[in-house]
Image (cartoon, rainbow, N blue to C red):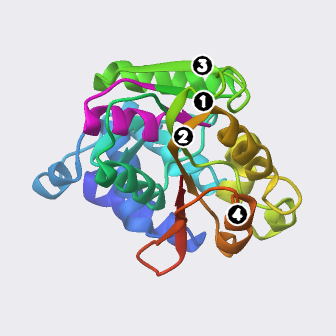
Amino acid sequence: MTIRTALEQGSELLGRDGIAEPRLTAEVLLGHAMHADRAYFYAHPEQELREVEWIHYGRYLDERLKGKPTQYITKRQEFYGREFHVTPDVLIPRPETELLVETIVKLKPAPGTLVDIGTGSGIIAVTLALELQRRLIATDLSFEACAVARANAVRLGADVDFLQADLLKPFADASIDIIVSNPPYVSFSDRPTLQREVRDYEPNLALFGGPNGLSIYKRLIPEARRVLKPGGILALEIGFNQSETVSALAADFAGHQLIPDLAGIPRVLVCR
């Protein structure tokens, strides 16, 4: 089987099953099987696959057809121009979260203690550590997520300390300058409407924020009030249609700023 034929057949299978961007997905999966990039395919379309490559490609296609996200098959996802390792123990990084990172970078924060809560794969903590050239602390309730995040930090050369912890419990009163978090904010009631890739494969712990999606905010915001220094910053990613409710939960904070994403949806809340 040639590269051209493999891509054509893979695209047809994926497209017939309703997989989005079937050709691109086939190219990514074949690239993972062959340890090659897409440019190589266009330069060598008539090259025949080795048996081991064909076997791996077929397995990856089968996994994707069953609903497994491509990122969990390749164990890779790009975020803020860097490649991160991901596993089913962590949420797949979304482009929307880059807005939270950009918000903190633009603030050009003075030296101090910066903490990422619910770090997952470590994308926020690692990216901020590299962009700001400073040490960070990150927490996650999941030991497995901390392990994934720590490996990403080591591989990318970021100075981050990871703690397995429930939100801000390890921190003393008035000890932190900046808190950032992309907490679980999907409502349990929305579960039936989620794509199967999300519903069946991504970790519930990182997805769901209780019956109305607000459970973590209701715990995190009061804890943030306790541990932030006077004038300290709290920056949160928020879900669709949650801006008013989350802002109300942080009513005791000052200087509320809602930052919209490219679609004009309020995506980040910043307050002091």
For the residues labelled 2 and 4, the Cα–Cα distance comes to 21 Å
Distance Cα–Cα, label 3 vs label 1:
19 Å
Q: Amino acid at mark 2?
A: Pro
| 216 sits to left or right of 254 | right
Q: Mark 2, residues whose alpha carbon is within 10 Å: few (<14), some, or many (≥20)?
A: few
As shown in the figure, which amino acid type bears the numbered disc 4? Answer: Val
Question: Which amino acid type corresponds to the residue marked 3 in the rendered image?
Answer: Leu
Q: Which residue is mark 3?
A: 163
Is the residue 182 above or below the residue 226 in the image?
below
Q: Which residue is mark 4?
A: 246
Q: The residue tagged with tag 2: helix, strand or loop? A: strand
Question: What residue did someone put label 2 on?
Answer: 230
| Closer to the eye: label 3 or 4 | 4
Q: Which residues are magenta?
A: 115-136
From the viewer's perspective, is the residue at label 1 or at label 4 nearer? Answer: 1
The residue positioned farthest toward the front in the image shown: 230
Alpha carbon separation for disc pair 1 and 4: 22 Å
Residue type beneath disc 1:
Ala
Earlier in the chain: of badge 1 and badge 4, it is 1
| Residue 174 disc label | 1
**Are there few (<14), some (14-19), or many (20+) residues within 10 Å of tag 3?**
many
Which tag, 1 or 2, sits closer to the chain's start?
1
**Left or right: where 46 falls relative to 33:** left
Question: Closer to the camera: disc 2 or disc 4?
Answer: 2
